[in-house]
Image (cartoon, rainbow, N blue to C red):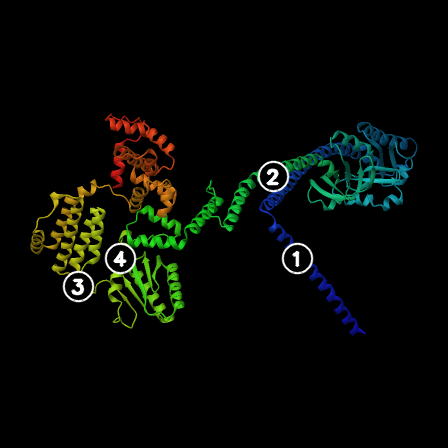
Amino acid sequence: MSVYQKAGRGSGSKPTVNAGVKDAERRLSLFRRAIGRFHDMTLAKKMWLSVAFVSLLALATFAALSSTQIKKMITDREGKVMVQQIESYSSSINHYFQNIQKSAQVLLYSSTIQERFSSNMSKLTGTERIRAYNEIYDHLHRMWDNLYGIDAIYLIDRYQNVFNISVEDANMPTFLTGEEFAKQGWYDRLGKSDGSSYWSFVRWNESKASIMMFNAVYNKSDLSLIGHLVISVSPQVFDGFLSASNLGEGTNSIIDSAGIAYTSGRGIGGSTVDVSALPEEEGYTSISQNDESYMVAYAKNRLTGWTFVHSIPQRIVLKDLKDVNSLWLLFLLVSILLMTIASAFLLRTITMPLRKMVKLVREVERGSLSGRFNVQHKDELGKLGLAFNHMLDKLQDGIPLIREKFIRSLLERNMTEEELREFERRLGFRFEGEWYQVVLVYMRDPKDESALMTAEAAIRDLELRCRMISDTLAANQYCLIFNCPEDEVLAQLEKLIGHLCNELGLQPYAFVGHAYNDLNLVKTSFEEAKTQLKYRISEHMDEETAIFFPGDAFDHQYPESFENRLLHYMNEGDFDMCTNVMEELIAHTRANRIAPPIINAMLVALYNQLYKQLIKFGNEDSLPDADWLGKLNTRLSLEPFEKNGRDFIALLRDRLGPLMQKQVRYSPNVAKALQLIQERFNDPDLSVDYAARTLGFNTNYFSQLFKKEAGVGFAEYVSGLRLQHAQRLLQETGHKIKEVAEQTGFADPHYFGVWFKDNTGLSPSQYRKSVHAGNEIVVPAGAPSDTNGGKIANRAQ
């Protein structure tokens, strides 16, 4: 049977455990479902709920903490006041009791009492007995007259003779000497007390109670006990003291050492407060009684050993806290309302831009790329808008096309700093290194198309590891533009070639151009690599993969990189850089002991380029004579290279410098724009947007660049050129006004007439008549003149 009982217990516990697990899983599922619904809400609803919840939580926490602190402050304040009032009350009672004790001492130690109580007065007879009794009662009456609030005075000798003055029950003396009273232990307590007196409450019957002071009477000679003094004080005395103590609302009690309490208005009864549990002589605490909390203040009286207690319900003490809580509730509601209004404003600043963003995204989904996010601030939403616009620019222009255009620009022409930054912004790429070097990678006899795709992927991975950008020139040719030191380029290139050869099974070759510290020399490095690629690709190429560098590693190699840099800076008119490169070349020549014929051949090439530049600028005074080459070779063979090189730089500054300063130089992009204007100024659709789109630039950037270099805005430049052309047609041809308007770029002849008159002060017909009549044409103030048009034409040339 016991086995079955154990099995039954075990089987009964499993469903309980399973039920608990299922209940926990169910609650967790409900919680997850609630979180999921919250996340599925709109942003506005989530913000509303979040702000409301956080505000309510924060304000409720603050209100609870504040209410608790205020409650503590009120309790401490009221408790201290109550203790002070109890101390005042205790002091008054103590003074009253001390007067009673002093009167008692005067009575007990008077010579009459001492003498009479030394013998049994009940054995006296006649006149002696009457005199003894009269003397004792005379002392009792004098004590009675000196004190107030006394119900009775009992003087009992050791022979059980009782002398009393009383307004109490006549049977009281018999009770005091009876066995019942002795059994209550009052005389024993008096004997064990520290002092000569003992105070307590005594209940005579259900309707009668007194405050009793018990005092032992000792013989002054031998200190033997000769009697007792019992004084009964009316409890109404306490009510009088209590009414004068200003303790106010609540219940006032006095508890003696036996635990008997006298409560004002209720009389004597058992104490509801455990006096022994009170930690100090005075203070305040809280107790719970009859399902209600009370605040209790107390103070112990050393004379009587009693504890004075004042208790009051906490709801009365904290009645002002209700008003504070009501005020907090009102403040909570007002605060939530204000926060709701503030959150509504914040929600508007967040949700409205997001709604616009969602609308733009839907337009993109429908195929429209013309929309743009209006960025007004620099916060996260503004950054998101900029990123969105940047993404649309990339989608509109096509990242591969921009990338290819950027690399082609680097390899074919000079590029300004502004153009570089614009390309970097659109591509998300940035050149930060000092050196630039071009490497051409050639794949010999690839197996199939997939092999080339894996090679392209390997090159793309290399872009992520180092500062490099690449492009595909042909099916098996790749251009890599590095922006890092030459040793790093070589290390990365060796890893790439090894990966392509060993892991992908390809036969790659790398052709490396020189490294230059100028962005516009990238095309020179490319030409050097392309030259190697051109002459080394043949049937006689090595079977092994290799990396080819310009020139062989022998001491007398031709300084091609220095020559290319010098030619570049000569064309740019940067003579300070020419000086620096020449000094580097001099140091390089000394260190490597390059043969003088090689250096002289390079100087001849530089002089040849110098004279080409002089011929280009049309400076006939600076042209060399017929035998300049022979004289140059003679001078180069007689003078050291250091002097010849520095003389060339001085000649360069002297002859080419002034001519370069006079020349108006434009960046390649602005030069292209000027050429476009010359070719298309008669097209009515010609505008700054059209030109920027044709050249592949942002409209705002292109407009600022054009005005910076040309000195006037794009529209003003086109307008001046059209005006000059219209004036020439009106002067030199007999074309109709409509034909002149069409050839000048105006589709509407009427608008052309208004525009022409605004700029010259005359209509086209009036202008033609004035010119044919030989009259002087006065151009209104502020209108572009023919001279200005001439300047614009000269700039375009």
Task: Residue type at mark 3: give it.
Answer: Asp
The answer to whether mark 4 and mark 2 are in CB contact below 8 A is no
Circle nearer the N terminus (2, 1) = 1
The answer to whether mark 3 and mark 4 are in CB contact below 8 A is no
Query: Which disc, if any, is residue 525?
Result: 4
Q: In this rendering, is residue 152 above or below 26?
A: above
Task: Residue type at mark 2: give it.
Answer: Thr
Could you tell me which residue is drawn at 39 percent across and 49 percent down? 425
Of labels 4 and 2, the one closer to you: 4
Give SS at disc 3: loop
Label 3, on which residue? 555
For this rendering, which residue is in front, 559 or 728? 728
For this rendering, which residue is in front, 482 or 327? 482
Label 2, on which residue? 340
Residue 464 seen in the current view = yes
Circle nearer the N terminus (3, 4) = 4
